[in-house]
Amino acid sequence: MCKSCKPDANYFRSVDCVYEYLLPAHPVLWLRDSLRTRPGYVSRSLLCPAGKVLAIQNRSDQSWRLRKDPNETLDEIPDEKRREFVLLTDEAARFQAFLLTWR
């Protein structure tokens, strides 16, 4: 995690930072990225395998925050057959998926 992140204030500068924060408690994570299926509509989140959304990207400044309210987004079981779900299994898969979020 970088020095700009403030976990106590629920602020993470990048998807990499929030991923590192969540990893100890959730060793398997999925990225859901709407841009993979709907160009122009940005909605990104990190999910656990059970489908619970753990973190959400802030649209205003591209930072990330942990989900606090169960009503702020829909949980959805990740389906590797759908292009918007990316299993973050290893460093190469993670790097490629995260690279697209920095555009």
Image (cartoon, grey):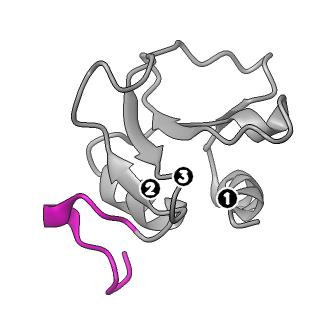
Residue receiving disc 3: 59
Distance (Cα) linking label 3 and label 1: 16 Å
Residue at x-position 45% and y-position 17%: 74
SS assignment at label 2: helix
- Of 41 and 92, which appears nearest the observer? 41
Residue 19 is tagged as: 2
Q: Amino acid at mark 2?
A: Tyr
- Amino acid carrying label 1: it is Phe
Q: Position of residue 84 (x, y in %)?
A: 74, 30
- Examine the residues drawn in magenta and state their main secondary structure: loop
Total numbered labels placed on residues in the image: 3
Are the residues at dot 2 and dot 1 in contact (C-beta closer than 8 Å)? yes
Q: Is residue 61 visible?
A: yes
The reply to whether the magenta stretch includes residue 2 is yes
Which of pointers 3 and 1 lies earlier in the amino acid sequence? Answer: 3
**Residue 31 at x, y percent in the picture:** 59, 39
Q: Which residues are magenta?
A: 1-12
Between disc 2 and disc 3, the foreground one is 3
Q: Specify few, some or many for label 3: CA neighbours under 10 Å numbering under 14, 14-19, or 20 or more.
A: few
Q: Is residue 77 above or below residue 45?
A: above
Q: Secondary structure at mark 3?
A: loop
Residue placed furthest toward the bottom:
3
How far, Cα to Cα, is label 2 from label 1?
Answer: 10 Å
Q: Residue furthest left?
A: 8
Report if residue 23 is visible in the image: no
Q: Quadrant of the C terminus?
A: bottom right
User: Quick one: quadrant of the N terminus?
Assistant: bottom left
Closer-to-camera residue (9/88) = 9
Name the residue at 81% across, 27% down: 83
Q: Which residue is mark 1?
A: 98
